[in-house]
Image (spheres, rainbow, N blue to C red):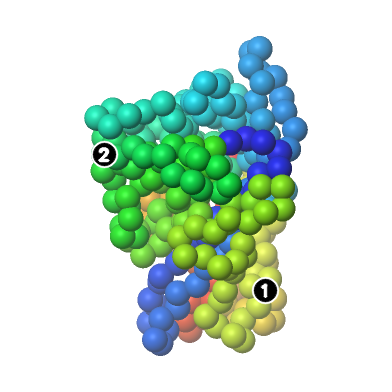
């Protein structure tokens, strides 16, 4: 799974319907995940996994069909995938570490394996494991040996609510693309608002270590910002009165967050950020 010629293209799909958004504001942001280099921790060799932003997002290793991941402090190792599972076995999704979050996702619980098969996928025969967990996108959590989850690089992927979730769009092996979940491109990034540049709002630095700046350009005409945690709970709502607002790490717990930028109650942009 962790060969350096592999690339995962993961679609973060949002189905948000704010006031004034007609007929809807559904859009997709695609992120590429790659493997490059290695590091030894406590005598074990972990591969470095990178997101499209370029930072090392997590340390992962695999051994005899099991994929392990370290947390951000490099002290705790959890099982990310277990491809030795069979029908009737169960897997605990409670303490998963997301890449690039490296913190426990929590709240998912333990689910049973309901189907195991062998299918020809991405150029070879692979074991496919299906669980009795439906995350709201109309499909069950499913693992593909050597690739990962159909929701992305991480099991269960990123789920904000029943309309906002991630899916694996493309798995690339040495330049050969294999598509999943009805995707036709490795980059399905789209915006529903044609007059808005996705680069008009920039948060830097990201991850947030101390204080970061959420900068607005003249194109954005933003008047409010909502910040949600990975569970979809509204953490903070801010009024925009200048060309930027400050994100103070001291006001948030470490983890993955999403900010939504609005103009006159119309959603302009949703992007993720990390607080270390």
Q: Nearer the viewer, residue 152 or 6?
A: 6
Q: Secondary structure at mark 1?
A: loop
Image spot of residue 88 (x, y percent): 24, 30
Q: Nearer the viewer, residue 84 or 214?
A: 84
Taking 98 as reference, is 78 above or below it? above
Which residue lies at the image location 38% right of the left edge and 45% below the top edge? 142
Density class for disc 1 (Cα within 10 Å; few <14, some 14-19, many ≥20) is some
Residue occupied by mark 2: 114
Taking 242 as reference, is 62 above or below it? above
Residue occupied by mark 1: 200
Distance between mark 2 and mark 1 Cα atoms: 45 Å
Image spot of residue 71 (x, y percent): 54, 29
Q: Circles 2 and 1: CB distance less than 8 Å?
A: no
The earlier-in-sequence mark between 2 and 1 is 2
Q: In this rendering, would 65 be left or right of 109?
A: right
Which residue lies at the image location 65% right of the left edge and 26% below the top edge? 46
Image spot of residue 202 (x, y percent): 67, 64
Taking 14 as reference, is 50 above or below it? above
> Where is the C terminus found, in terms of image quarters?
top right
Q: In this rendering, would 25 be left or right of 161?
A: right
Density class for disc 2 (Cα within 10 Å; few <14, some 14-19, many ≥20) is some
Query: Which disc, if any, is residue 89?
Result: none
């Amino acid at each position: 799974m962790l060969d350096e010629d592999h690339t995962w293209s993961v679609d973060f799909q949002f189905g948000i319907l704010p006031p004034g958004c007609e007929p809807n504001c559904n859009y997709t942001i695609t992120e590429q995940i790659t493997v490059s280099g290695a590091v030894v921790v406590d005598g074990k060799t972990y591969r470095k996994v990178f997101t499209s932003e370029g930072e090392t997002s997590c340390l992962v290793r695999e051994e005899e069909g099991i994929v392990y991941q370290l947390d951000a402090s490099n002290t705790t190792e959890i099982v990310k995938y277990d491809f030795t599972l069979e029908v009737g076995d169960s897997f605990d999704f409670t303490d998963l570490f997301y890449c690039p979050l490296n913190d426990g996702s929590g709240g998912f619980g333990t689910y049973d394996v309901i189907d195991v098969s062998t299918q020809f996928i991405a150029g070879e025969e692979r074991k496919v494991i299906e669980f009795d967990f439906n995350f709201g996108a109309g499909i069950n959590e499913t693992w593909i040996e050597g690739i990962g989850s159909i929701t992305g690089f991480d099991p269960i992927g990123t789920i904000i609510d029943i309309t906002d979730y991630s899916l694996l769009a493309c798995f690339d092996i040495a330049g050969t693309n294999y598509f999943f979940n009805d995707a036709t491109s490795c980059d399905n990034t789209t915006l529903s608002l044609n007059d808005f540049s996705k680069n008009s709002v920039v948060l830097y630095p990201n991850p947030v270590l101390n204080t970061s700046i959420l900068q607005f350009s003249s194109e954005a005409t933003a008047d409010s910002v909502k910040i949600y945690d990975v569970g979809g709970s509204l953490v903070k709502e801010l009024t925009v009165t200048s060309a930027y607002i400050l994100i103070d790490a001291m006001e948030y717990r470490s983890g993955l967050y999403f900010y939504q930028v609005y103009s006159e109650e119309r959603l302009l942009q949703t992007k993720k950020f990390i607080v270390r």
